[in-house]
Amino acid sequence: MKKERIVVKIGSSSLTRPDGSLSRSQLNHYVKEIASLRALGHEVILISSGAVAAGFGGLKYPSRPVTLPGKQAAAAVGQGLLMQAYTEAFDEYDIETGQILLTRSNFSNKEQYQNAYATLTELLRRGVLPIINENDSIAVDELTFGDNDMLSALVGGLVHADCLLIVTDINGIYDANPKESENAKKYHFITEITEELYKEAGDAGSNVGTGGMRSKLEAAETALNLGLRVFIGVADQEGSFMDIMEGKGDGTYIGFSGQFILTNKKQWLLLHSLPAGEVYIDDGAKKALLHKGKSLLPVGVIKVTGYFERGAVVEVKDEKGNLLGKGQVNMSFEELEAIKGKSTQEASEQIDMKRPEVIHRDDWVDITKERFKYEHYDGTR
């Protein structure tokens, strides 16, 4: 078996007892499964939910809290308990662990995004198993990654992983809710995520987790587009992870990665950067950007909106207002407003241009070309 870089996402429902508290026996099971992958030379990054479920008992809540302050307080208590449990369990296999807590802002901030990549790369190089969770205790938009499903896909893309295993309490994707319909049929293999699948997906399937099958499909679609193949299903038996890697897992396999891979720089631009303005361009510039692989020059700019400094990210639109892509600008709003429509020579005479391009092709991502849907950028459809 080829040695691979594997992202394993384990949901709350797979780590808790019926009363919602953390199950050490279930956690130990998954630790053993991950250790078996590591023993074969695979690199593993673990994305683990369970902090809220692990912590609400310590706050004397009778059940999982439903308010945002209650969830965040439970996460503050539970994250330490969850990490302690993992550390003790992995110690049995002489596996060192490292904790990373992330929020959406860590992905939208380019420097923090690059730092996350550097940290994860160094941990893997040193043989440490990274354990990642959303920083629920300070997240302002509640659990914005969808029970860590989208987080696992984005991390997989960030570290250029080979595959993503989403472990849940339902053994795959069905054409109907298997808990409600005995005639529901399971998809054993799916080549792509379609709108029909989204229509068939239900909401959250557990009272201890926040992400339902829909969020898993969204994560799978993002993972596929970032070059990973995906498995969604259960892994509650001894040897389950090995079975999954050998194509015998109890769940649904989704797609094969092919050769479509975005660099980290373009992943950040496409998925995480926050536009500070809009740049409208003429047809000549549109053809140069979309079909000739050229950079955007001042002569092609017809309108500028927003307010931004050099290095900011902007959306680029055509004359009709259709979104074409996103890019980092080499000049401020005032500078671009002053030289729009002018030749490079005229522009350089008017302002101090360190680079002649408004947006260099290396700092540009074509949204019309990539397989992502723009409405996915904020984690919603």
Image (tube, rainbow, N blue to C red):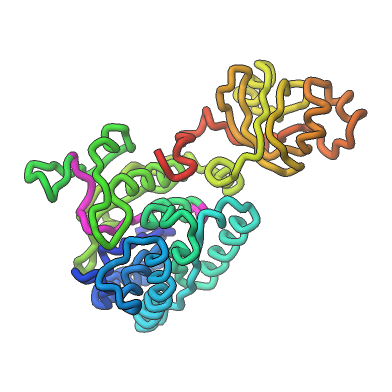
Asked if the stretch drawn in magenta spans residue 162, the answer is: yes
Camera sees residue 139: yes
Q: Position of residue 61 (x, y in %)?
A: 29, 73
Residue furthest toward the left? 182
Q: Position of residue 336 (x, y in %)?
A: 78, 31
The residue shown at (62%, 33%) is 315
Corner quadrant of residue 14: bottom left
Residue furthest toward the right? 349
Judge whether 27 appears above or below 170 on screen.
Answer: below
Left or right, 81 with reference to 309 = left
Q: Can you say which quadrant of the picture contains the C terminus? A: top left
The residue shown at (19%, 66%) is 237
Could you say which is closer to the camera, residue 253 or residue 277? 277
Left or right, 118 with reference to 37 = right
Camera sees residue 42: no
The residue shown at (33%, 49%) is 216
Asked if the stretch drawn in magenta spans residue 280, the answer is: no
Q: Can you say which quadrant of the picture contains the N terminus? A: bottom left
Judge whether 338 appears above or below 20 on screen.
Answer: above
Residue bounds of the magenta highlight: 158-175
Corner quadrant of residue 187: top left
Q: How many marks are shown on the rendered structure?
A: 0
Q: Position of residue 181 (x, y in %)?
A: 10, 44
Judge whether 362 appears above or below 302 on screen.
Answer: below
Could you say which is closer to the camera, residue 67 or residue 27? 67
Corner quadrant of residue 58: bottom left
Q: Position of residue 368 (x, y in %)?
A: 52, 28
